[in-house]
Amino acid sequence: MTSSSSGLTFKLHPLVIVNISDHHTRVRSQSQPPVANGGDATSSSSSSNSLAPRVFGCVIGVQRGRTVEIFNSFELLYDSSSHSLDRSFLEKKQELYKKVFPNFYILGWYSTGADAEDSDMQIHKALMDINESPVYVLLNTVINHAQKDLPVTIFESEMHVIDGIPQLRFVRSSYTIETVEAERISVDHVAHLKPSDGGSAATQLAAHLTGIHSAIKMLNSRIRVLHHYLNAMQKGEIPCENSLLRQVSSLLRRLPAIESEKFQDDFLMEYNDTLLISYLAMFTDCSSTMNDVVDKINIAYERHTRRGGRTTAFI
């Protein structure tokens, strides 16, 4: 399958991937019985992923010039007999989302599977009256432990002439993962959830450190590849690519920003504010504990004095 030549830049937010994965997991669990104890969980999971029904939905976001940013998604009803979507349900969901997110538009649709199928083009064409050039986000739900990249593919549609007949074909497009602060906090919270099998804190810490080590190792390998590429470009072994040099230069200009005086002042101010909030929370907790102790002492002293004929309170 060829790559896209549209020149669009796609930015995908983690919420979309989480929504698609959650949609697939719910449909799979509802359509198939649970795995019996003692069975091979890995093989059962792989087979259930391959046999699970596909899920469909719409992706929404904004397009600014040549940049398409996909923020969110919602589910759709799909008729497998006619290979079509429930249009009334789609219009109703679009109207509801438009009230909550007035700046978001339907950019395309999503599904699950290993690759785009022939029937997918029929759904793609049906959405062209909403968006003349919809995008297709495909999530591969088959687990592949050797794969390092995300199992997500974004397709665009282009008109190709085949045997003298113009036909729409899916072409792959590159994308980057874009996150906001709220998404980073949510993903970090999900990553620190306690495992359902009752794993200990040490197990969770080991898994967390392993993830950090893998991320640093991947970052180091990519920086090394970029360094070798620039050295080869400097020696004339490969042709000079100005667009890549501009991106590298833009990346390097960001690095000194963390060593500026303004950054240090802002960092220290935020650090002091965080410490102050922690101290206030600690004082509040201590005050609440002291109040509980005082109430208990007063109750105990009042009971003791009533037996002796006095009603004077301790405090």
Image (cartoon, rainbow, N blue to C red):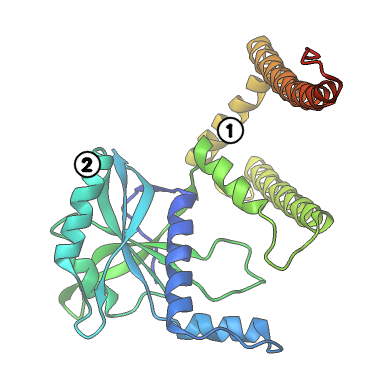
How many numbered marks are there?
A: 2
At label 1, which amino acid type do we have? Leu
Looking at the figure, which quarter contains the N terminus? bottom left
Image location of residue 157, percent across then percent down: 27, 63
Q: Quadrant of residue 23?
A: bottom left
- In the rendered structure, which amino acid carries the disc numbered 2? Lys
Classify 10 Å Cα crowding around label 2: few (below 14), some (14-19), many (20 and above).
few
Q: Nearer the viewer, residue 218 or 231?
A: 218
Identify the residue shown where x is 33% and y is 69%: 56
Picture layout, residue 65 above or below residue 158: above
On residue 99, which mark appears? 2
Query: Which percent across, then down, holds residue 164?
Result: 16, 77
Q: Residue at x 66, y 82 (%)?
A: 41
Question: Which of 283/10 is in front?
Answer: 283
Between disc 2 and disc 1, the foreground one is 2
Look at 48% across and 43% down and name the residue there: 178
